[in-house]
Image (tube, coloured by chain):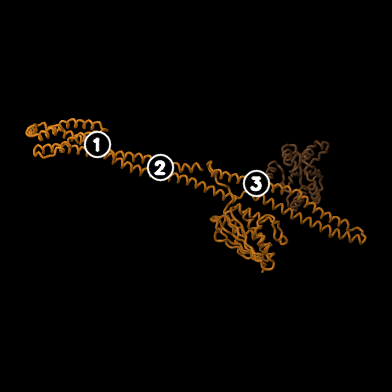
Amino acid sequence: MLKKWLIVLAVPLVFQVLFLGALLKSQLDRDEAQRMSIHSKEVLTESATLTRLLIEARSYMLAQVVAGNVPRARVEEAAAAIPVQFAKLHGLVSDNKGQRLLVDEIAAKARPYVAWVVEADRLARTGRGEEAVERFKSTTDRATLAEVRARIDRFLAEEQRLDRERSATLERAVRGQDLAILLGAVVSLATGAGLVLAFSRGFARRIGTLAENARRLAEGKALAEPIVGGDEIGQLDGVFHAMARSLKERGQENEMFIYSVSHDLRSPLVNLQGFSRELAYTAADIRKAVEPLEKPPAAAARLERLIEHDMPDSIHFIQNAVTRLSAIIDSLLRLSRAGRVEYRMQPLDLDATLGRVVEALRDSIAEKGAEVAVDDLPPALGDPTIVEQVFANLLSNAVKYLDPARPGRIEVGAEPDGGDAPGFRTYHVRDNGLGIPEAHQAKLFLAFQRLHPGVAQGEGIGLALVRRMVERHGGKIWAESEAGVGSTFFVTLPASDGTAPTDGPIPRVAATIGAPQ
Amino acid sequence: MAPESLMILLAEDDDGHASLIHRNLERAGLVNGFHRVKDGQEALDYVRGQGDYADRVLSPNVLLLLDINMPRVDGVEVLRQLKGDAATAAIPIIMLTTTDDPREVERCYALGCNVYITKPVDYDGFINAIRQLGLFLQVVRVPRNGKTA
């Protein structure tokens, strides 16, 4: 898992590093382009200075020739500055061979010209001005200057071209940089977002499955397919599956154990029942055999007591105990079978089911003089036999534990919905019987807990069985009760849309079964 | 009453059960010959007139009450062997046992048992069945020597 998180962090980081690199390079390019652009401008400026110097020297010289009033220093300065300027220019374009040669060429051409200017100036200052004028008239002066200027122009043109080129490069560099920034940001964000999305979705989905499995494990339901992946989530899921298997095995072992023990108990039980019966027969035979005999009164009385009271009493208790024992074993078998039997789920018409249940209990209901009212019940989904057993058990309990002090009233109905369980419906069986004190309510659904052993027959297994059955349908069962007031048992079952085939034309029981009028 | 009396053979390893069955058969009015063996091997020996019973005077008509859970050879094996042999296939066999596993029941019927009775936890029902059996046995007719006609 850690590796994946590192990937999610690392990949965008890599992109960002690349992006920074590209950014850096483009900045360098831009700097370079800018430098070159500035450089060109500098060359142009220095060229202009050179031109100016050349012209200035000439001007001073001409002025001297014409007016004779130019300080000598001016011309000398100008003349001296020109080679310096050439040297400067040479240095500036030293990176460009073509331009450098051109500068040297111009310098070569300019040298004699400058010398001529200086010479002309000297002539002017030494009174040989006419000679200078004569020399002017020759085309050499102008032609040389023209040549020099032509070359300078060419130089300038080239430099300007270079300048334009470099400006264009600079512009491209700037644009390129902008694009790189944009692209880098977008790609980095996109990959980052994409990875996080993909990772979190996969991650969230797997965590979701894990949480779902944990919940299913708690409720004893089957788990989803194992989660793929060697990371912590996959491992945790593997643990859940192992837990589920272990629980299932344990449960099955328990059931097998209960089953085999209770099954083995049946054989001695047959003997117990049989021979307690045999004893009764034997007692009867003894009585018959002894009756016609002549007995002294004391002995007769004693014999009478033994045969009529002691023996039957003993036999009676043995038989009672044996009956109870057999009932317990039977319940155990049924309890162990409750986990093993396959349920066949189908839509159930609960009105019909309750009808049958109430009918089966008719005698005991009438005996207690109780009233049973069954509301319209919405259909549920479940195994018909099992659900009938559930309601039979609940109703039978309700009848058994009625309070003799008041007329019994039992109601069977349904809540509008499944409460906080969507897809389920809540049904209730309410009575105004003896109720269950709070202390016992926690143990209500455990096996072998009986609150009122004296009140009615039973082994205390019923509710444990019922809970197992209800839970195997995915539902819940709980009770609300107050001692001395009554109890209500709630059961949730999966809802059905009601396309239930009714089990025969059994009328709904909304009637009251009570003492005959 | 059949001219040749029917011999009831009970194969049951539990002494208590055997005693109960015998007593109740008698109470139901059964007067047939009754013999009890303790396991499947003895049952087979008796029917075939071999082993411990090599010198038994073979009663011509035998009906077998068979418990399933017995040591050495169990009831199902006895059933299989007897029904698989033409010489003994016609002997009526009634399974009496505590198992009510439907698969077991089916297996026994598939092997050819005639009736399957569960020794139920409800003792009355069991005794009733024995009683009915007793009445039934009084009127049943069995081919001679257990051979098919």
For label 3, the crowd category at 10 Å Cα-Cα, with few meaning under 14, some 14 to 19 and many 20 or more, is few
Toward which corner of the image does residue A467 lie, by quadrant? bottom right
Residue at which label 3 appears: A250
Tell me what residue is drawn at x 84 percent, y 54 percent: A282
| Mark 3 or 1, nearer chain start | 1
Q: Is mark 2 on a helix, strand or loop?
A: helix
Q: Nearer the viewer, residue A216 or A174?
A: A174
Q: Distance between the residues labelled 1 and 2?
A: 36 Å
Identity of the amino acid at label 1? Leu
**In the rendered structure, which disc, 3 or 2, sits on the residue that comes first in sequence?**
2
**Residue A102 to residue A216: above or below:** above
Task: Check the residue under mark 1 and report the chain it is in.
Answer: A
Name which residue lies at 54% across and 49% down. A211
Q: Residue A16 carries which label?
A: 2
Q: Is residue A151 left or right of residue A403?
A: left
- Residue A434 % position (x, y): 67, 64
Q: Quadrant of the C terminus of chain A?
A: bottom right
Q: Residue A497 carries which label?
A: none
Residue A90, horizontal then vertical, whole percent:
23, 33
Mark 3 or 1: the one toward you: 1
A335 is higher (above) or lower (below) than A108: below
From this viewpoint, is residue A139 visible? yes
Residue at the spot of label 1: A162
Q: The brown chain is which one?
A: B
Residue B119 x, y percent position in the rendering: 74, 49
- Dot 3 and dot 1 residues touching (CB under 8 Å): no
In depth, the one of B109 and A165 nearer the eye is A165
Q: Where is residue B86 in the image (x, y as percent from the top left)?
A: 73, 37
Q: Distance between the residues labelled 3 and 1?
A: 91 Å
- At label 3, the amino acid type is Arg
